[in-house]
Image (tube, grey):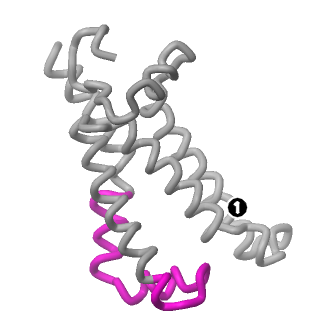
Amino acid sequence: MASFSIAVAFGVRLLLVMLFLPFSALDKILNFRGAVGQAKQAVHATGPATALILIGVFVEIVMSLGILTGIADRFAAFVLAGYCGVTALLWKQFWAPGDFWSGGKGRELFWDFWKNLALAGGFLLVTFGTGAATVETFFSDPFASSKPYSLSETAR
């Protein structure tokens, strides 16, 4: 049963980060110019757009690995939650096209916007835990591991 419990804990974390590692990070690396072009929609200049993509690749790889390994996993999840929120606000602006009610791009972005925020919520569960009693744990030591693969209940 212990191996199964550890596998479930790992599998849940893998599902949470799989969008970023490997898929989104790999897409940014293999299609770097296209990624910079997309970032330019928000910042309109090549230098800052390139910096945003490099930061994005770093966040997606390093923070995902933190969540998977349990090394500073709460902090990594907190950063990825913020990343999801920022990307929703910068690139999923469903209100901008003005065609929400006619079923255009705005309606498609609406769902992407809320999916990003829902994913941020999943990362915040890793950050803060599932109850009010665990929130203080993060703020007292944000870089501590939640020890996700420990079988003792006191590890949290």
> Mark 1 highlights which residue?
110
Horizontal side, residue 125 vs residue 149: left or right = right
Q: Position of residue 110 (x, y in %)?
A: 70, 61
When the figure is inspected, residue 107 is found, relative to residue 111, above or below; the finding is below
Q: Is residue 50 above or below residue 2?
A: below
Residue at x 49%, y 88% (from the top left corner) = 37
Q: Pick whichever, 140 or 123, lies toward us.
A: 140
Q: Is residue 36 magenta?
A: yes
Judge left or right: residue 151 versus residue 67.
left
**Residue occupying image coordinates x 28% and y 36%:** 11
What residue range appears in magenta? 20-49
Magenta residues: mostly which secondary structure?
Answer: helix
Residue at point 44% right, 21% down?
Answer: 137
* Image spot of residue 122 (x, y percent): 49, 38
| Quarter occupied by the N terminus | top left
Query: What is the count of numbered marks?
Result: 1
Residue 7 against residue 47 in the figure, above or below: above
Q: Amino acid at mark 1?
A: Phe
User: Where residue 22 appears, x then y in whole percent?
Assistant: 27, 61
The image quarter in which residue 35 lies: bottom left
